[in-house]
Amino acid sequence: MEGVVKKFQGKFLKVKEQLNRWDDLQSCLISQFRSASSIIDRLQVLQNPSSYGCLSCNCNVRDALFANQMKSLDNILVSMRSTLEEFRNIVLFLEKTHHDSRQLVKGSSTRSNMKHLQQQIGVKPTLMDCLDGLLFLHDVYHSEYLLKSSIISTLSANALKKPSSGDLVAIQQLLVDQPNLLIEEVQRVFDIIFAEEL
């Protein structure tokens, strides 16, 4: 059983790498969101003819500026969808790791009963701890991915419906906070898995 736990620890090292990548993607998504929000705010100003002063009679200038900003917004939204796809790949990796780990436990003993799953050697985690930890990580990151997808879809659908700056700030804060990720709980999973003998 100790050998299986060591295999689990190897899997958790790969999981930790993916979660570090998640943090990098999070920074990227927030930056993209801020850029999109700035353009959305700007579009509202560009749609107001009084914003152009003496150029208000020149429709070509207004149309060109608006089209340019729309193209930039579209490019940012495409980038955000690409970033979301990378988040999705991490969630799929977590799901596959959990599935493969269940298969590993089933293959490690002909009798993977509850007693075997809860057997502990020293301070090393039980197989149940490992499986529960992987399931927990998948669940919280999957929930966070779904929230991010919903936020970006809403932003894309409502970009031209003049959302208020306050709404955009609130949505951005929701992205920044990552409300489904209980960082202390995530760290606790890694602390359990990598418990060392005293």
Image (tube, grey):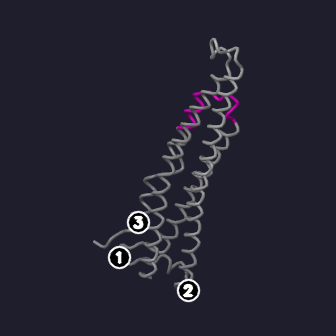
Question: Within 10 angstroms of label 3, few (less than 14), some, or many (20 or more) residues?
Answer: some
In the displayed structure, would residue 191 be above or below residue 42? below
- SS state under label 1: loop
The image position of residue 37, as x and y in percent, is: 58, 34
Between 93 and 135, the one lying in front of the other is 93
Q: What residue type is labelled 1?
A: Gly
- SS state under label 3: helix
Region rendered in magenta: 158-172
Q: In the picture provided, is 198 more to the left or to the right than 19?
A: left
In the displayed structure, would residue 123 be above or below residue 186? below
Q: In which quarter of the image is the C terminus?
A: bottom left
Of tags 3 and 2, which is closer to the observer?
Answer: 3
Between 89 and 58, the one lying in front of the other is 58
Choose the circle earlier in sequence order: 3 or 2.
Answer: 2
Question: Within 10 angstroms of label 1, few (less than 14), some, or many (20 or more) residues?
Answer: few
Of tags 3 and 1, which is closer to the observer?
Answer: 3
Instruction: Identify the image quadrant of residue 170.
Output: top right
- On residue 122, the disc is 1
In the displayed structure, would residue 91 be above or below residue 120? above
Q: Which residue is drawn at 51% across and 47% down?
A: 28
- Give the residue at mark 3: 192
Q: What residue type is labelled 2?
A: Arg
Furthest residue in direction left, as rendered: 198
